[in-house]
Amino acid sequence: MILGVAALISCWLLVGVPLGIAAVLTGDVARRRVQRREANNPRVAMAGIVLGGVAIVAGLVAVGYYSWLDAQTPDH
């Protein structure tokens, strides 16, 4: 969940996409540990997955916006 929050905060810096991927992967690992009864935090695992996914989408939107913005500036 910590990676998900960090990814969501930094998604506009383009660092959020790799952090979001890491959050989704670690959230999935945590979810599998909950299923094997090695951990007891299913909501935290799901929150990490969801926040990571949102950060990935927001980061990709930021990349698209920055690309569009770059294409709109006149060449000098």
Image (spheres, rainbow, N blue to C red):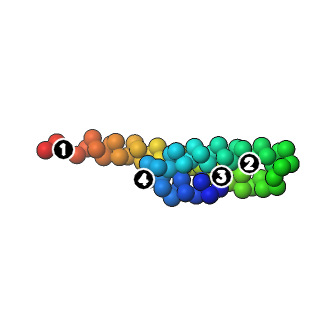
Using the image as rendered, state which of residue 20 and residue 54 is in the foreground. 20
User: How far from the left and from the top, in percent, is residue 20?
Assistant: 56, 47
Q: Which mark is residue 74?
A: 1
Which residue is painted at 68% across and 54% down in the image?
47
Q: Quadrant of the C terminus?
A: top left
For disc 4, the marked residue is: 13
Q: Amino acid at mark 4?
A: Leu
Q: Are marks 3 and 2 in contact (CB under 8 Å)?
A: yes
Residue 8 position in % (x across, y down): 53, 55
Q: CA distance from mark 2 to mark 1?
A: 48 Å
- Residue 48 — which label? 3
Q: Please tell me the numbered disc located at residue 12.
A: none
Query: Looking at the image, do the residues carrying marks 3 and 4 touch, with CB atoms under 8 Å apart?
Result: no
- Circle 4: is it few (<14), some (14-19), or many (20+) Cα within 10 Å? few
- Tell me: residue 72, above or below residue 1: above
Of pointers 3 and 2, the one earlier in the residue sequence = 2
Q: Nearer the viewer, mark 3 or mark 2?
A: 2
Residue at 45% over, 45% down? 61
In depth, the one of 38 and 17 nearer the eye is 38
The residue that label 2 is drawn on is: 30
Q: Is residue 68 left or right of residue 58?
A: left
